[in-house]
Amino acid sequence: MTTDEHAERFTLLRPLLFTIVYEILGSATESDDVLQDSYLRWAEVDLATVRDTRSYLARLVTRQALNALRASARRREDYVGPWLPEPLLLDDNDPSADVVLAESVSMAMLVLLETLSPDERAVFVLREVFGFDYDDIAASVGKSVTAVHQVAHRARAHVQARRRRFQPVDAAKTAQVTEEFMTAAATGDMAGLLTLLAPNVTWTADSGGKATAARRPMVGAQKVATLLMDLFRTSGQMPGMQIQTANCNNTPALVAHIGGDQPEGVLLMQIIDGKITNFYAIRNPDKLVAMTVVRQISR
């Protein structure tokens, strides 16, 4: 039966546990479900048998997250258009001081993690982001320590071969680029907008077929700039439309509202060396539900 001590231990570690599960699933709402189920299981545990609460709970939530990830595999295969992780609404100052944490929850990294198998993803996250030892990871994924070493090596090589260079966020430069982007897009300044975009800037939109959005990624500054101009022109003609800035996944984001708490869409920007290299547009209303709650993350 649950006790105050069960609750205290779980609550203390909840930001860490949420972050582990979110990085494995790429879904804040599914992560909440996993944590709820995990807590019910935790409440039945005899605390006298638990030597290390952090490791024990990490193993518990990882196993539940892997079950959820495998269960959702078919849904993702049948998904209409590109699949993007759910945006994670953060406090402006939450992860920025921790470079490893900031990169691990970035949309670019989460998209890359989608290319790993469930076991590879869990092993990579637990080892590279959270620094768990191989014994704990083996217990979490149900493999031998030797097998986990092999999985970790394979996953690390896969990620390193595909990851883009990540730098600590220059808050002042990021704010400047974001402000200049907003001004150029809102005023129809195509030339100004093009100066902010990397030549091979990529636009990826996730609607799940439930909202209007491009069904394939778009690449190239001129194409993306033209699309952005059309979107801002259209949104400017919609009664009650408001666009605000937010911190999503430690990335500057624009959030569009037409009344109510749930946004109509979220646009995340990846900025490298003062240029916008990626836009991630989330339009699927199911994935925007999580944007009503500011999250705490930790490692």
Image (tube, rainbow, N blue to C red):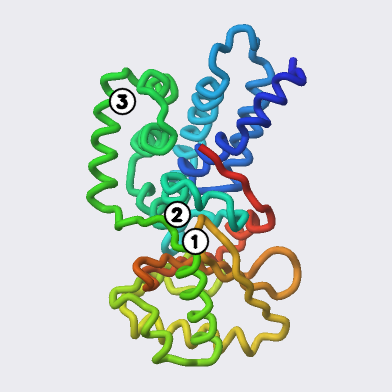
Point out residue 38 in the picture as x, y percentages from the top left corner.
61, 28
**Disc assigned to residue 148:** 3
Between the C-alphas of marks 3 and 1, the distance is 32 Å
- 274 or 251: nearer the eye? 274
Between the C-alphas of marks 3 and 2, the distance is 25 Å
* Number of numbered callouts drawn: 3
Q: Which callout, 3 or 2, points at the residue further toward the start of the chain?
A: 2
Q: Amino acid at mark 1?
A: Thr
**Disc assigned to residue 51:** none
Q: Going 68% across and 31% down the picture, which residue do you hit?
A: 11
**Disc assigned to residue 251:** 1
Point out residue 88 in the picture as x, y percentages from the top left corner.
56, 54
Image quarter for residue 246?
A: bottom right
Q: Is residue 214 above or below residue 141?
A: below
Q: Are marks 1 and 2 in contact (CB under 8 Å)?
A: yes
Image-based side of 126 in relation to 265, left or right: left
Point out residue 191 in the picture as x, y percentages from the top left corner.
39, 91
Name the secondary structure under disc 3: helix
Image-based side of 115 in relation to 70, left or right: left
Q: Which callout, 3 or 1, points at the residue further toward the start of the chain?
A: 3
Task: Between label 3 and label 2, give the one nearer the viewer.
Answer: 2
Q: Is residue 180 above or below residue 292?
A: below
Task: Between label 3 and label 1, give the one nearer the viewer.
Answer: 1
Q: Local crowd at mark 1 within 10 Å, few (<14), some, or many (≥20)? A: many
Q: Local crowd at mark 3 within 10 Å, few (<14), some, or many (≥20)? A: many
**Disc assigned to residue 106:** 2
Q: Amino acid at mark 3?
A: Val
